[in-house]
Amino acid sequence: MTDAWERIQIILEKSLKSGIFQLWIKPLQGSFDPDAKILRLQAPNEFVASWVRERLQSMILEAGQDVLGVTPELEISAFRADEAASPLGSPEKAGASETRMHLPIQSNIQVVSRFRYSFQDFVVGPSNELAFVASRSFCREQVSSDQLFLCSSTGLGKTHLVQSMGNNLAGSSNKEALRVAYLTAEEFACQLIQAIKSKQVERFKARYRDQIDILMLEDIHFFQGKEKIQGEFLSTINSLQGQGKKVVLSSSFLPKELNDLDSNLVSRLCRGFMAVIDKPDLGTRQEILRQKASSLQISLPQEVSHLLAERIQTDIRQLESCLSNLVFKARMLKERITLEMALEVLKNYDLKEQNLDLEEIIRSVCRVFDLPREKVCSKSRKKQHVLARNLAFYLARKYTGHSLKDIGRRFNRRHSTVLKGVANVEKEVNTDTPLGRQLKDAASRVMPN
Ligand SMILES: Nc1ncnc2c1ncn2[C@@H]1O[C@H](COP(=O)(O)OP(=O)(O)OP(=O)(O)O)[C@@H](O)[C@H]1O
């Protein structure tokens, strides 16, 4: 019988454009573990693995469901360079440390996305050095602080550092592997609500207080305005730290900006070490490009690397995406990467950089959404008005030096409303939902090149 991965590939070949199939699916090696219901895919390098995770994961899961009759869990990992070179050719999965971890609750999403990053592939520069050093030292046993709080705007490396810590802590080979729980604040909240509904709160508490050694929680700004959940979260970190356990938190906003958070919790968040990641300088952006290009086994002409790093300044996720699209285009056309090709690809990106004028953003949002200013700056809850307003909040946060309070004042809204709007747009854009694509498209029209 043909093996499961081969049959899944046949479905994918039919549903994907041939170029995409050849470039991203063909190089994957797959195996299905029928007992654990896990589909394991290995990519030739981390770049391909992460491209597939971000863009093709749901299609692979759907095809898996068709072939296997159940939706498998999906693990996508890359061969490690040293293992890929092994003459035995049977590399251990890069994600092996994931399986050594005891994640208290496993869902598809958790297994797929856990710990794909490591310290080795984090490029250090003046903007992130403190966060990098703090994250590394946090993994040492004798470190004094039991809490690390990482903060930056979107796409600047928080998750990369948190997952690097996860890899390091869960994978320590000279001692018992630590039990690391890694999840987003939203997942924590959903699990708590489920536990309340099914009267399993004691189990939930035991899971996050007694059955783990380290709690890693991302995007804690999600707790804003959710009092009951904040209470449980505060008790959880108090309990963990009371037992000498550690907590790592990430957020797009500083604790002092989180107005709708209980003051005890804010003060608790400020107690540990706080590290902010700023926008990377040109040298760091170029080095990131060099590293990503080398993981793709391509050499990027100097002038192209300079052009991309010059034009995309505020979000490394965009820089990576631009590079992968460029490589994809060159491979499809079977041409060399040139400056002209790079300029063409750059047209799809949002290139205006910081220090834009807030008024200019509002005017452009009104133009793109074809709405009068009174609607965008009003309290109207009509879907289109909310979308336009949230996009304006997001762009203002990203491209102006204004605080949430300042932005709120201009729209006659509370700063927590601005924060919520920014977080909503970030979430949609980063997870590439249809609404996210619509917003990205609108953003690129608001900020023409
Ligand atoms: N210093 C760096 N070196 C190498 N890659 C980086 C660096 N900083 C960020 N990246 C890459 O940029 C992408 C986005 O980073 P990451 O997801 O960690 O951002 P984030 O701050 O968590 O964003 P968000 O707030 O949207 O979740 C990732 O692919 C990551 O590997």
Image (cartoon, rainbow, N blue to C red):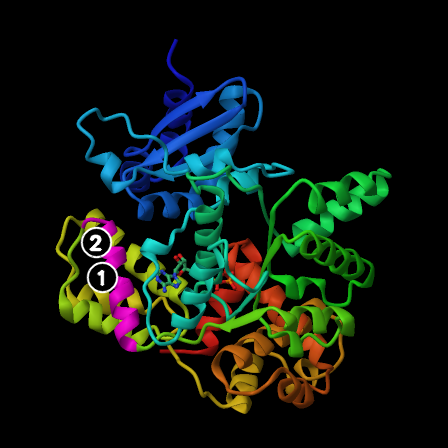
Residue 269 at x, y percent in the picture: 66, 69
Q: Quadrant of ligand 1?
A: bottom left
Q: Nearer the viewer, residue 43 or 358?
A: 43
Residue contact between numbered discs 2 and 1, judged by CB atoms under 8 Å: yes
Residue at image coords 28%, 34%: 27
Residue pictured at 45% horizontal, 22% vertical:
32
Q: Position of residue 140 (x, y in %)?
A: 46, 55
- Residue 204: which numbered mark, if any? none
Amino acid on which disc 2 is placed: Ser
Q: Nearer the viewer, residue 301 or 258?
A: 258
Q: CA distance from mark 2 to mark 1?
A: 6 Å
Residue 49 in the figure: left or right of residue 326:
right
Q: Please determine whether, in this image, residue 250 is positioned above or below residue 91.
A: below
Q: What residue is pinned by disc 1?
A: 290
Mark 1: C-beta under 8 Å from nearest atom of ligand 1: no
Residue at figure coordinates x 38%, y 30% from the top left = 14
Q: Position of residue 8 (x, y in %)?
A: 42, 25
User: Considering the numbered disc 1 on the image, is that residue within a helix, a strand or a loop?
Assistant: helix
How many numbered callouts?
2
In the picture, the disc for residue 294 is 2
Q: Which residue range is magenta in the image? A: 282-297
Using the image as rendered, state which of residue 77 and residue 370 is in the foreground. Answer: 77
